[in-house]
Image (tube, rainbow, N blue to C red):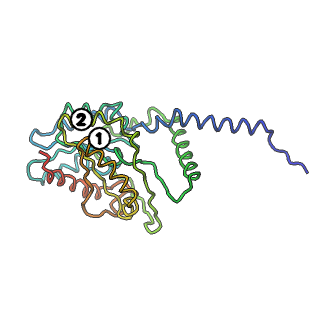
């Protein structure tokens, strides 16, 4: 008994279309996705304006990062209440952030560090993930083929969203990164079954595009540090394993030796899932704890 199937040429066209799409993703869309930041010029301008508005006697600090910084550092209204209880000198903390991994666009396209050199803050803080850790997840328990399939699927979804994106979609997003954005509803996670996924350290070729700008900061005498944002205790136990820390330390040593950039590991009170809206982004109570720790750390280090 014969079964009727599609002609061979139909399969040929199907696989040709599939591989053609993969070529588009890897050669055209993927580089754009990796370099895109969903913040815009107005958001950047508002952050720089906020930094310039600081009192001359205050310690001017800017922290640069992803949405982890956007959710993890208090907005101006929240921070004012914390600052009012401080003893002089006061710390004027401005956050510059974008969704995804915004490091390339901030440095290459927006020339952020050149603009900061003109303002001359007392301290620049880089989120660890921007300068040293990949945002892509890596599960060592998966085979190379399975990891490749997962990554391919992820980039296909991102590519489709990128190609379909509406230029007007972000018009209603708050333009001032210092303003308070209401917390999303916390995700109720089953912390018993939740298994954090390992991440990998960025390779030299992925970060060297910023080296000339970091040298400019060093020559300008602007103190620069790499700062951790806290993660839930269970995530940190998985995340900061011995092999990962060994690789990370090599990158941190390179930053210290070549650019004089220190590393500030978070040493504040332990954070649990109740301090987060998901597995990594802090909620209002979590970012208050972190912001208080960071302000105190800045003073302890005697930045001025």
Mark 2 lies on a secondary structure that is helix
Q: Residues within 10 Å of mark 2 (few under 14, many from 20)?
A: some
Distance in Å between CA atoms under marks 2 and 1 = 8 Å
> Does 89 appear above or below 103?
below
Is the Cβ of the residue at disc 2 closer than 8 Å to that at disc 1? Answer: yes
- Give the x, y percent position of residue 19: 63, 37
- Whether residue 178 is visible: no
Residue sitting at 77 percent across and 35 percent down? 9
The tag on residue 96 is 1
Left/right placement of residue 119 relative to residue 273 reads: left
Report the quarter where the C terminus lies: top left
Mark 2 or mark 1, which has the lower sequence index?
A: 2
Question: Which residue corresponds to the image point at 30% horizontal and 49% vertical from the top-left?
Answer: 252
Q: Residue at x 54, y 57 (%)?
A: 142
56 vs 193, left or right, is: left
Disc 2: which residue: 48
Local secondary structure at mark 1 = strand
């Amino acid at each position: 008994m014969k079964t009727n199937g599609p002609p061979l040429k139909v399969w040929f066209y199907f696989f040709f279309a599939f591989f053609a799409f993969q070529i588009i993703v890897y050669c055209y869309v993927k580089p754009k996705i990796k370099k895109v930041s969903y913040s815009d010029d107005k958001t950047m301008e508002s952050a720089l304006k906020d930094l310039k508005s600081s009192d001359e006697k205050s310690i001017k600090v800017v922290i640069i990062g992803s949405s982890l910084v956007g959710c993890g550092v208090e907005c101006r209204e929240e921070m004012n209440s914390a600052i009012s209880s401080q003893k002089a000198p006061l710390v004027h903390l401005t956050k510059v952030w974008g969704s995804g991994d915004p490091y390339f666009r901030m440095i290459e396209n927006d020339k952020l560090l050149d603009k900061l050199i003109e303002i001359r803050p007392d301290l620049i803080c880089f989120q660890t993930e921007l300068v040293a850790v990949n945002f892509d997840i890596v599960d060592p328990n998966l085979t190379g083929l399975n990891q490749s399939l997962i990554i391919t699927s992820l980039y296909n979804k991102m590519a489709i969203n990128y190609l379909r994106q509406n230029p007007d979609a972000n018009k209603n997003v708050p333009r001032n990164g210092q303003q308070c954005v209401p917390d999303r509803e916390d995700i109720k996670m089953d912390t018993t079954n939740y298994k954090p996924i390992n991440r990998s350290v960025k390779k030299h070729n992925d970060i060297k595009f910023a080296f000339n700008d970091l040298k400019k900061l060093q020559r300008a005498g602007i103190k620069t540090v790499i700062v951790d944002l806290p993660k839930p205790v269970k995530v940190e136990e998985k995340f900061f394993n011995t092999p990962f820390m060994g690789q990370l330390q090599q990158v941190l040593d390179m930053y210290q030796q070549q650019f004089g950039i220190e590393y500030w590991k978070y040493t504040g009170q332990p954070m649990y899932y109740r301090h987060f809206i998901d597995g990594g982004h802090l909620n209002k109570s979590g970012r208050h704890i972190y912001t208080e720790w960071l302000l105190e750390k800045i003073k302890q280090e005697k930045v001025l």
